[in-house]
Amino acid sequence: MDRIRIVGGAKLNGTIPISGAKNAALPLMIASLLTDRTVTLENLPRLADVSQLVRILSNHGVDYSIDGRRQGEGSEAGQTVHMTAREIVDTTAPYELVSRMRASFWVIAPLLARCGEARVSLPGGCAIGTRPVDLLLMALEKLGGSIEIEGGYAVAKAPKGLRGAEITFPKVTVGGTHVALMAAALAQGTTVLHNAAREPEVIDLAELLNKMGAKITGAGQSTVEITGVARLNGAKHRVLPDRIEAGTYAMAVAMTGGDVLLEGAQAHDFQAALDVLALSGATVESTNEGVRVSRNGGPILPVDVETAPFPAFPTDLQAQFMALMTRANGVSRITETIFENRFMHVQELARFGARIKLDGDSAVVEGVPVLKGAPVMATDLRASASLVIAALAAEGETMIQRVYHLDRGFEALERKLSLCGAEVERISAGG
Ligand code: UD1
């Protein structure tokens, strides 16, 4: 298994190109199941989760091809891929494939909408708390699907097709909103979603679906209206920039000091996080090329943060922000309201000498003047990023084990950081 070795202390200076968003790429790719025509996605990131989803979609009959790199294009340029589900050859998504990535459960929506049936393994346990799919299934039932749980599978049927409906989510769910959008796009009649997720990735999916011929209005707001159509066409779409990747590097710069342009990042996609960074003493500037973050000399100030659905501070940046606060000049309180149990990074951050106490759904972080490098273990995707941030500022060497978690969601992390002056290297298994 690969490891990442970081020697802390260097400031970050330069430009980091921001990749296409993993959390947009996954639903966009899944949407290719809705049509027998070709869906072309540009700026698709090279990530382990993307490769895993390709395997799952191929099993349903999606043909997948990648354009060669154009002359002069760097290896960090996103890929252009073409996906065509001319025929759905299998409506079952088996446990071996689905259990490795929760978002793959979302294939249930296009399979049910297009084929009238789907048999999808329920996702297994997850390191960041129970993440049920009850609201996703509720949405499909409202649309006229019948759902049975059999042998660990959700078996969905709608032999006469889906029908538009009013769907009210009791809790904001990104996955639930994606599933409802995809299913309602091919349902008969009009669907109205209430309390829909407003995340930029939801807007990105709705934009692709509309290019494919869907009739969706209001994506990005709490109420979304979808008028179903009989069939969808192919389309071409560029994956939006990854706000979580951009936010992670923004926190890294706030931690180490320096000055970095996050090329391609869109400030409005993670404004709440940028506002918090500014309060912590970093300088944040939105430019035509992206977002520029710097901190020169001043202390890191403590800021209290509470995660909540978009447009509030994202749970996917909570661990990274906690890493920053371990070096703050005072005490901060970080409250996690989306996922219980999303504090596994606390124990690993303690290995650097961080002082963090858990208090229910909050972590109370008492900033310390120095962190010290240590051997640590990545536990989940975003938690791993927090270890990288701590390591970049720690004295001495840190060795991060289980970096496959990072590879799920951060494209070329060690290259992007080294280009800005960090001492980071990947040690390949056996190397
Ligand atoms: C997506 C993101 C993930 C992010 C999360 C919240 C992707 C691939 N993943 O995950 O990175 O952390 O949004 O922004 O885009 N819930 C239920 N029942 C359900 C579904 C969800 O109770 O049927 C709960 C969850 O347990 C959680 C909350 O709703 O407490 C939000 O979850 P949700 O927005 O659905 O997260 P995901 O879509 O799985």
Image (cartoon, helix red, strand yellow):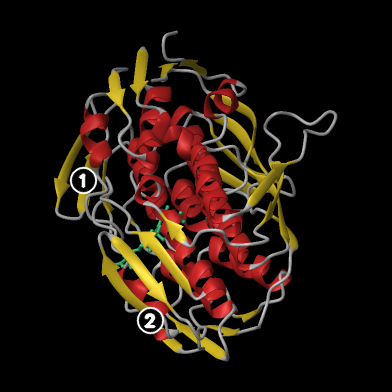
Picture residue at 55% right of the left edge, 25% below the top? 417
Specify the label residue 364 is tagged with: 1
> How much space separates mark 1 and mark 2, taking CA atoms?
41 Å
Quadrant for residue 169, please give it.
Answer: bottom left
Residue furthest right as drawn:
71
Relative horizontal placement of residue 359, taking residue 345 as reference (left or right): left
Residue 297 percent coordinates (x, y): 49, 28
Amino acid under disc 2: Glu
Residue with the mark numbered 2: 141
Amino acid under disc 1: Val
Would you say the residues marked 1 and 2 are in contact, meaning their CB atoms lie under 8 Å apart?
no
Picture residue at 39% right of the left edge, 73% below the top? 156
Picture residue at 41% right of the left edge, 30% below the top? 404
Relative horizontal placement of residue 422, taking residue 349 as reference (left or right): right
Image quadrant, ligand 1: bottom left
Residue 389 percent coordinates (x, y): 41, 31
Specify the label residue 88 is tagged with: none
197 versus 364 height, above or below: below
Quadrant for residue 4, please give it.
Answer: top left
Instruction: Tell me the element at label 2.
Output: helix
Residue 358 percent coordinates (x, y): 16, 46
254 versus 119 height, above or below: above
Q: Is mark 1 within 8 Å of ligand 1?
A: no
Picture residue at 51% right of the left edge, 67% below the top? 111
Q: Nearer the viewer, residue 348 or 422?
A: 348
Residue 107 percent coordinates (x, y): 48, 61
